[in-house]
């Protein structure tokens, strides 16, 4: 029986995408060869890469607006450094909303001065800082749109004239935003797009080429752009699966359609968390993530029973991150409303018994 996969990442992908991807491992589109044994310079793979890049821009509404999409390697973690390498000359601002922001700050400090413009560390990152002032003289401002570990999500982004950089690893393609307010977006594939092994980078070309340092080829966005995201052998399988997922999303009606479903899933679980005294939400209500719902059990004596009931119902991957404890239900794009319903049923059963 297929389980309900609430894992935070790597995580659930659409079933039909998995089916097509596994077929392509044996033979890609009747060409008599496997996807993973053909040259990345073959016309078949070049078409896949181009399709993936253009679908990403199309879904984000960024076609013809001076942006390019790249599929790189090294995970979002490499982007922490790469963004700074390419864009930080003197001083940059970071909004610290959790573990991933802190890691981004650590890497960027290797390249210049970092100003922590705002932080929610004082409350173990259970909220998103708001109403902060952005100091003058920054090369860019960096945010993490969705805090995968703490379950908070930025609902409104600051208005600023300096380049805005956003780590969207865990909520890209999940909700409508004016993506043109960002100058650089990056996201590891393994949360909402594909298997681990590739990172989507969407960059506005005119922000590049402004730092004075020499950038190593593999860390230079311009080098990758100049080679159409094929400077070296790309991770062909993750790129292919990402392309399939983006196509799946487009056929579903794009981000607008998936957002509606994601809102329903989030409403379902959060109303249960609010109404059921056995559970308490971790994140501040107005900042709750529609991707990762974090909650605790209020009566520890019920924990064993809850865990057993979840197991019985085929619910997988809801243990919270070790820095938060409790539970975390990740509800990425491919998760159905029905699966969230199964979890909510188990939660409400516990209340009736409790
Ligand atoms: C998972 C995650 C990362 C790390 O991604 P890797 O691809 O493993 O390097 C970075 N930022 C956010 C917000 C994440 O959720």
Image (tube, rainbow, N blue to C red):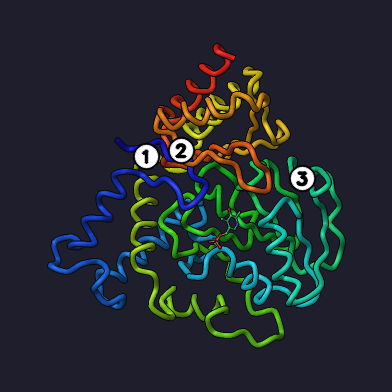
Pointer 1 and pointer 2: residues touching (CB < 8 Å)?
A: yes
Give x and y (percent) for residue 15: 31, 43
How many angstroms separate mark 1 from mark 3 (CA)?
37 Å
Residue under the image location 55 percent in, 50 percent down = 170
Q: Quadrant of ligand 1?
A: bottom right
The residue wearing badge 1 is 252
Q: Position of residue 143 (x, y in %)?
A: 69, 55
Question: At 43% from the left edge and 38% from the top edge, which residue is drawn?
Answer: 335
Between residue 22 and residue 287, name the one nearer to us.
22
The residue lying at 54 percent from left, 63 percent from top is 202
Q: Position of residue 220 (x, y in %)?
A: 57, 79
**Does residue 338 sit above or below 206 in this rendering?**
above
Q: Which circle marks residue 220 in the picture?
A: none
Q: CA distance from mark 1 to mark 2?
A: 7 Å
Name the N-terminal-most of marks 1 and 3.
3
For label 2, the SS is: helix
Outermost residue on the top side: it is: 352
The reply to whether dot 3 and dot 2 touch (C-beta < 8 Å) is no
The quarter in which the C terminus is drawn is top right
Q: Are marks 1 and 3 in contact (CB under 8 Å)?
A: no
Residue 103 location (% of width, % of height): 68, 63
User: In the drawing, does residue 105 fall left or right of residue 327?
Assistant: right
The tag earlier along the polypeptide, 3 or 2, is 3
Disc on the earlier residue, 1 or 2: 1
Residue holding disc 2? 258
Residue 268 is left or right of residue 208, and the answer is: left
Question: Quadrant of the image for the N terminus?
Answer: top left
């Amino acid at each position: 029986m297929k389980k309900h996969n609430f894992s935070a990442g790597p995580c659930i992908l659409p079933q039909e995408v998995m089916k097509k991807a596994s077929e392509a491992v044996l033979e890609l589109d009747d060409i008599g060869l496997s996807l993973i044994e053909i040259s990345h310079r073959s016309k078949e793979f070049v078409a896949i890469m181009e399709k993936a890049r253009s679908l990403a821009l199309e879904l984000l509404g960024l076609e013809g607006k001076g942006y390019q999409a790249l599929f790189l390697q090294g995970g979002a973690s490499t982007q922490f450094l790469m963004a700074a390498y390419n864009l930080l000359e003197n001083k940059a601002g970071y909004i610290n909303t959790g573990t991933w922001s802190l890691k981004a700050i650590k890497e960027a400090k290797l390249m210049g001065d970092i100003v922590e413009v705002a932080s929610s560390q004082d409350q173990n990152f259970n909220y998103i800082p708001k109403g902060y002032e952005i100091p003058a003289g920054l090369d860019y401002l960096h945010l993490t749109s969705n805090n995968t570990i703490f379950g908070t999500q930025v609902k409104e982004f600051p208005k600023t004239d300096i380049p805005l950089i956003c780590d969207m690893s865990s909520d890209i393609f999940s909700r409508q935003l004016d993506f043109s307010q960002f100058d650089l977006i990056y996201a590891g594939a393994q949360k909402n797009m594909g298997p681990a092994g590739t990172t989507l980078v969407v960059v506005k070309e005119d922000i590049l080429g402004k730092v004075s340092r020499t950038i190593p080829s593999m860390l230079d966005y311009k080098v990758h752009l100049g080679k159409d995201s094929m400077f070296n052998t790309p991770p062909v399988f993750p790129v292919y699966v990402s392309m399939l997922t983006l196509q799946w999303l487009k056929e579903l009606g794009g981000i607008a359609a998936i957002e509606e479903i994601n809102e329903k899933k989030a409403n379902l679980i959060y109303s249960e968390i609010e109404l059921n005294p056995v559970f308490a939400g971790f994140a501040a209500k107005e900042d709750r993530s529609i991707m990762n719902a974090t909650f605790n059990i209020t009566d520890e004596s019920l924990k064993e029973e809850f865990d057993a009931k979840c197991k019985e119902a085929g619910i997988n991957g809801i243990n919270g991150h070790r820095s938060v404890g409790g539970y975390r239900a990740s509800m990425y794009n491919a998760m159905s409303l029905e699966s969230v319903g199964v979890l909510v049923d188990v939660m409400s059963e516990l209340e009736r018994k409790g």
